[in-house]
Image: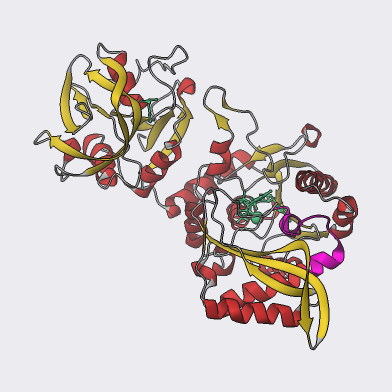
Amino acid sequence: MHNNVLILDFGSQYTQLIARRVRELNIYSEIIPYNKVPTDLSDYGAVILSGSPLSVRAEEAPIPDLTKIKGKIPLLAICYGAQYLAHFNGGNVAPSNTREYGRANLSFIKEHEPFFHIINEGSQVWMSHSDTIKELPKGAVLLASTHDVENAAFRIEGEDSYAIQFHPEVYHTTDGEQLLKNFLVDIAGMEQDWTPDAFVETTIAELKNTLGDDKVILGLSGGVDSSVAALLLHRAVGKNLYCIFVNNGLLRKNEFHDVLEQYEGMGLNVKGVDASARFLGALAGESDPETKRKTIGRVFIEVFDDEAHKVENAKWLAQGTIYPDVIESVSVSGGPSATIKSHHNVGGLPDYMKLKVVEPLKLLFKDEVRRVGASMHMDPNILGRHPFPGPGLGIRILGDITAEKVAMLQDVDHVFIKGLKDWGLYDKVWQAGAMLLPVNSVGVMGDERTYEKCVALRAVESTDGMTADWVNLPYKFLQKISNEIINKVKGVNRVVYDISSKPPATIEWE
Ligand SMILES: Nc1ncnc2c1ncn2[C@@H]1O[C@H](COP(=O)(O)OP(=O)(O)OP(=O)(O)O)[C@@H](O)[C@H]1O
Ligand SMILES: O=c1[nH]c(=O)c2[nH+]cn([C@@H]3O[C@H](COP(=O)(O)O)[C@@H](O)[C@H]3O)c2[nH]1
Ligand SMILES: NC(=O)CC[C@H](N)C(=O)O
Ligand SMILES: [Mg+2]
């Protein structure tokens, strides 16, 4: 009861961050498009309205019906949300004359307001808007101003409704977390009891309830998400969980074998399917990156479908979909599509598979998935594993793929990753890998001319893969690794290090 925060999304680029910040307070939150307000609101202890790229003055302005919310459930309206409360309740919102983007400081805070508890004048806030609230709505009490924005925060008298023009969810709002805590805990009275242990317990109970004695199939990749999903499902349905791990011939060196072995120790029922030849056959001669991705996706579905048919009476397909995957495919106007992303790295499963989809992690962020795994005592080696793309080395071999190139890149990648581990750098890097370039260059080895391949090493820091920066690996390390690669991997005579950030580059080269 009342243990959930409803975040109504108006399409702001920061909506996900609001959810994150709320969960960092150990309070559960869910993002729902503004036009899909649930009819039953009894679970929600507070509602937050997000920002929006649209203007309240625009014809297509998102206008949700808040009659069951405003004045009834504690409400926090952010940016567009604040403008919305003003505009439709007798206030006035107009384009602003000055640019209101970036850092600002609160120059006035009304005293003795629980909303601003232990937040002081001068506190830095982040603004990102072009409309401004010229006149407050009926019953509003001004709570804070900045130099340029007089109506930076207000509340509605007699209600637990609060509105702010700035963004508390953005890191640059230094007291943002405190402000959210003031609102959620002190004003809305929410409990801070949402922990990984609690998540595991309730999720297993829910899965038992939904799945009963049905058989469930899960594509296991060796990655964090599908592994944590597998553990949860295993606890819920035991031997009715059938895990399938496909070798697409584009995995890391020894990975097929190692991953299978690792799962054996966890008591999971995993079937390894070696479909390398099928994948490499389908990819032969293909060098266009998008066609390669699509081919890998298509063959993956074929293999998966073949295997799924071997499990008699399977009813469910489980997936390790996580929250960012879901949110990426929710459009603000359309709302969530029926099936969100079946296999987001393999292009979606076809309807003929007739399996119902179950996604136990679909409301978690990556770091939360890791925490949930840790609370189930999952092997830290799996939990700490760098993300690895479904199409694997296929998108790190530029141009067409051959078995020889795969073997060459596997060896290069192995030296690099092992080196990172040996030097204690692996856990300091978010993701690392090597790219095989379609470039030959001239070298000299033992007095002989060589004309061989060039590889690029890439190591990045990131939180979610959406943006990334290259890692400043020690020169000594790079020197050692470059030497080792050229000495050990036949066919490679040159190593370069990728120093591009994302954007404008991407993490993978294809
Ligand atoms: N080789 C594979 N065999 C079987 N299923 C796979 C394979 N590769 C990917 N999948 C499926 O595709 C899903 C998406 O892959 P993705 O790489 O995004 O997640 P992950 O591998 O579980 O975690 P991570 O992001 O840490 O790599 C996986 O959860 C898994 O269900
Ligand atoms: O499961 C996946 N299927 C894919 O098709 C895919 N393409 C990229 N990635 C991973 O996503 C992150 C961002 O990669 P990019 O900067 O290259 O887009 C990085 O972590 C990439 O490894 C993929 N993961
Ligand atoms: N970030 C926002 O919510 C912006 C709201 C509105 N589109 C404006 O420009 O003022
Ligand atoms: Mg993966």
Q: How far from the left and from the top, in percent, is residue 139?
A: 18, 16
Q: Is residue 402 above or below residue 41?
A: below
Name the residue nearer the viewer: 355 or 367. 367
Tell me residue 17's x, y (percent).
Answer: 41, 42
Q: Nearer the viewer, residue 482 or 405?
A: 482
Residue 401 colored in magenta in the image: yes
User: Residue 299, position in %: x, y?
Assistant: 83, 47
Q: Nearer the viewer, residue 203 or 384?
A: 384
- Please tell me which residue is depicted at 74% across the width and 37% down the height of the picture: 355
Residue drawn at (44%, 18%), measured in percent from left and top?
62
* Quadrant position of the N terminus in the picture: top left
Would residue 72 be seen by someone viewing this image from the given angle?
no
Spot the residue most to the left: 111
Left or right of residue 111, residue 280 in this image: right
Residue beneath the point at 65% across and 55% down:
508
Asked if the magenta segment contains residue 93, the reply would be: no
Q: Is residue 61 left or right of residue 289?
A: left
Q: Look at the picture and state if 139 lies above or below 207.
A: above
Where does the image place residue 165, in percent across and percent down from the top left? 28, 30
Above or below for 232 versus 135: below
State the image quarter where residue 30 is shown. top left
The quarter of the picture where residue 435 lies is bottom right
> Is 175 in front, or is 122?
122
Instruction: Give, as a single range, the part of the protein colored magenta.
Output: 390-408
Instruction: Tell me which colouring the rendered structure shows.
Output: secondary structure
Residue 99 visible here: yes
Q: How many marks?
A: 0
